[in-house]
Image (cartoon, rainbow, N blue to C red):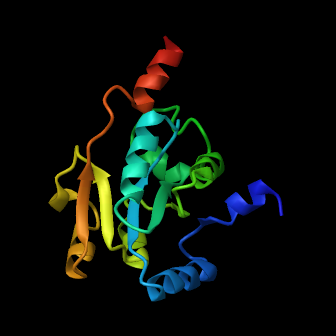
């Protein structure tokens, strides 16, 4: 099996039976599951820093990636996402500290968080923990909701403006 095929085995959709079996196996092994999500359009150093810090909070990092339709509904601009969901999720899955990528179509990852049942829910520090989608799910199971500071000077929007300029 080539490397790309191995990477693509880390990418799922929420309705896949294989995903539910894999999550059950991870829980059975009592690995600490960390979940975060985003569009991750133009992967940059800020994303790498954020995701590596998220992985440090547990054993198994699950990243929810907004589908193209979901990303468009976020209102980040007419030309977003710049890269399609297959490209974004494959690049995400290629990172050694990302264990699983799940592409979701909803406006928020709430249903996905219910499915994954993470032990740790992570978002950027521009959120208050209690305002993070899925806070109630993780708190109800005794998990942690953590915010991570962004690396200053890095954003997809800033990169997009620089390219256009």
Q: Is residue 107 visible?
A: no
Image location of residue 84, percent across then percent down: 62, 44
Going by the picture, which residue comes out furthest to the right? 1
Q: Position of residue 16 (x, y in %)?
A: 61, 77
Residue drawn 31% across the image and 29% down it: 152
Question: In which quadrant will I find the N terminus?
Answer: bottom right
Residue 10 position by quadrant:
bottom right
The image shows residue 40 at horizontal and vertical percentages of 48, 44
Q: Is residue 164 visible?
A: yes
Q: Position of residue 37 (x, y in %)?
A: 41, 56
Q: Is residue 94 above or below residue 160?
A: below
Between 78 and 149, the one lying in front of the other is: 149
Q: Nearer the viewer, residue 80 or 99?
A: 99
Q: Residue at x 56, y 76 (%)?
A: 15
Vertical placement of residue 43 versus 113, above or below? above
In the image, is 16 to the left or to the right of 46?
right
Residue that extends furthest to the top in the rendered view of this protein = 165
Horizontal side of residue 102 vs 33, given as left or right: right
Number of on-image labels: 0
Would you identify the image quadrant in which residue 18 lies? bottom right
């Amino acid at each position: 099996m080539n490397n790309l095929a191995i990477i693509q085995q880390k990418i799922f959709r929420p309705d896949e039976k294989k995903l539910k079996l894999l999550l059950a196996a991870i829980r059975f092994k009592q690995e600490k599951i960390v979940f975060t999500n985003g569009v991750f359009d133009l992967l940059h150093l800020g994303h790498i820093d954020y995701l590596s810090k998220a992985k440090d909070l547990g054993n198994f990092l699950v990243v929810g990636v907004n589908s193209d339709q979901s990303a468009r509904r976020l209102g980040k601009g007419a030309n977003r996402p710049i890269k399609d969901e297959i490209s974004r999720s494959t690049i995400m899955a290629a990172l050694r500290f990302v264990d699983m990528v799940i592409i979701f179509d909803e406006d928020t990852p709430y249903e996905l968080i219910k499915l994954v049942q993470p032990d740790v829910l992570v978002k950027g520090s521009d959120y208050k923990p209690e305002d993070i989608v899925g806070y109630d799910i993780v708190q109800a199971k005794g998990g942690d909701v953590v915010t991570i500071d962004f690396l200053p000077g890095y954003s997809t929007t800033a990169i997009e403006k620089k390219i256009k300029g």
